[in-house]
Amino acid sequence: MMKTPKIYIKLLLSIILVTVMILSYSTSSYAMESPEFVRIGLNYISAAPSSCQISGNEELALWDFQGTENFYVLSGVKVVSASSLNGVLTVTGSNNEELTCEAGGDVKKVSEMLLNGFSLVSGNYLEYLNSDGTVFDSVVNFDDKAYRGGISFFMNANNTFNVINELSVDEYTYGVINGEMGYSNPIEALKAQAVVARSYALTNLGRHDYSGYDLCDSTHCQVYKGYSNENEKTNMAVNETKNLGIYYENLPVSAFFSKNSGGYTQNVEDVWNEKLGYLRGVKDIYSPVYKWNVQFTFSEIESKLRAAGYNIGNLKSVAIKDKNSSGAVAAMEFTGDNGKATILKEKIRSILGMSLIKSTMFDINEEMNTTIASRGVYVRGFDLSKLMEEKIYVLDDSGEMVELDKENSFVMDGNLSCKLFEIEFEPSEVTGGVVKFDGLGSGHGVGLPQDSAIEMATQGFDFIEILNYFYTDIEIK
Ligand SMILES: [Zn+2]
């Protein structure tokens, strides 16, 4: 049963609009064994090549990343070409010769070793790992970008292969922070992002196991751009938080983050399904205002619904039926001449377009000049006639006090045992033409909002304070 759609908000209230990241998948925690290395997908799915070139800044070597003695330098070979012919990987040198190496007393094909757990690394990689990590010249190059660690391949069914970067967790984190947050931000915000990125990586290993790697390099997992996109300051944020992760009830946890909360972060179960004690919605007083809007015609919405498998005929109305405690839309109802579709939580965004509906903190209107008051604010008070002689103020969607437009308001005669007054929103409903979405925030709103981390750091909070504000009852260790 749908809950009653009316939402009462005590005292002065705003129309709260708003937030995102993506994907409903299980968020259960893994026992973090601190695996030292991760596998990151660089080119995969439609971008998976059938041939490519890899080079090192020194002679290349093969290594299996298991901390073993198995490290085989390919003497004199600085560049290799990998190609897939009829589903078979071949790795050749600059004279097009098939490459072999001596491993454990046997002569083995480099191609086979690369498909069996070995990676191509720069010949000085072990030396680099055994140093204090400040040597920066151990990289391999692929597709005009440099990467720390090594490159390996995973054959696909269609005669292409996925290109995978294997490297230590901290090396990976170096390549994440600048892409996810940007070096120009304050160091304490970058440190918060570093702890979050490391925790996220270590608790989501194996997410793309079926494709031969742990994490992809896009926003689906975390944006990773390798050595080429590193910066001294973001690397410092990684070094100054070395080995620190986020723990809840003594287990390492996956630290979700998104761009902007729109003023309130979300309980995780209000966005996906599983309830988790450390991902509770909090009032975000540090959130910079981030507004967005988008509009769709009814026929555009009809085709989006059809594409998602909802055949409700000609659309007759679009309504917000429920909001959660943070003010985010929890349920929308689409009514057509052939049925109804009720869509919940993040699924609203995935059906209408994640990049268009930037958050679930939104309201809807017919496409016309809409102010809070003209949408019909219902005010109930004990002395209504007197109340209407006064100016009434409400908060608008940017948190500013504005005077209520009483011309377009309706006073209802209620005998509520009331507080001074309450404002009640009727559910927004649009019954024709074009529906406009006005929202605040960007992202799913679970966990750390990056914009707020930057604002808190600017105000002088350190990364521990920032993380503790947005993750409930956690330990950072
Ligand atoms: Zn991914």
Image: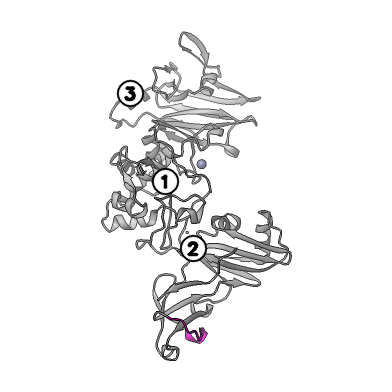
- On whether ligand 1 comes within 8 Å of the CB at mark 2, the answer is no
Question: Which image quarter holds the C terminus?
Answer: top left
Q: Is mark 1 within 8 Å of ligand 1?
A: no
At a point 46% along the width and 8% down the height, the residue shown is: 105
> Which class describes the residues within 10 Å of circle 2: few (<14), some (14-19), or many (20+)?
some
Q: Earlier in the sequence, mark 1 or mark 3?
A: 3
Give the CA distance from mark 3 to mark 2. 54 Å
Q: CA distance from mark 1 to mark 2?
A: 32 Å
User: What kind of element bears circle 2?
Assistant: loop
* Helix, strand or loop for disc 1: helix
- Camera-side residue: 421 or 465? 421
On the image, the x and y values in percent for residue 195 come to 35, 44
- Quadrant position of the N terminus in the picture: bottom right
Q: Which residues are magenta?
A: 406-417
Q: Amino acid at mark 2?
A: Asn
Q: With 298 as the anchor, is 395 left or right in this view?
A: left
Q: Amino acid at mark 1?
A: Gly
Give the mark nearest the N terminus, 1 or 2. 1
In-image side of 476 versus 92 (left or right): left
Compared with residue 79, is residue 350 higher up or lower down, i.e. above or below?
A: below
Q: Position of residue 409 (x, y in %)?
A: 51, 83
Q: Which residue is mark 1?
A: 179
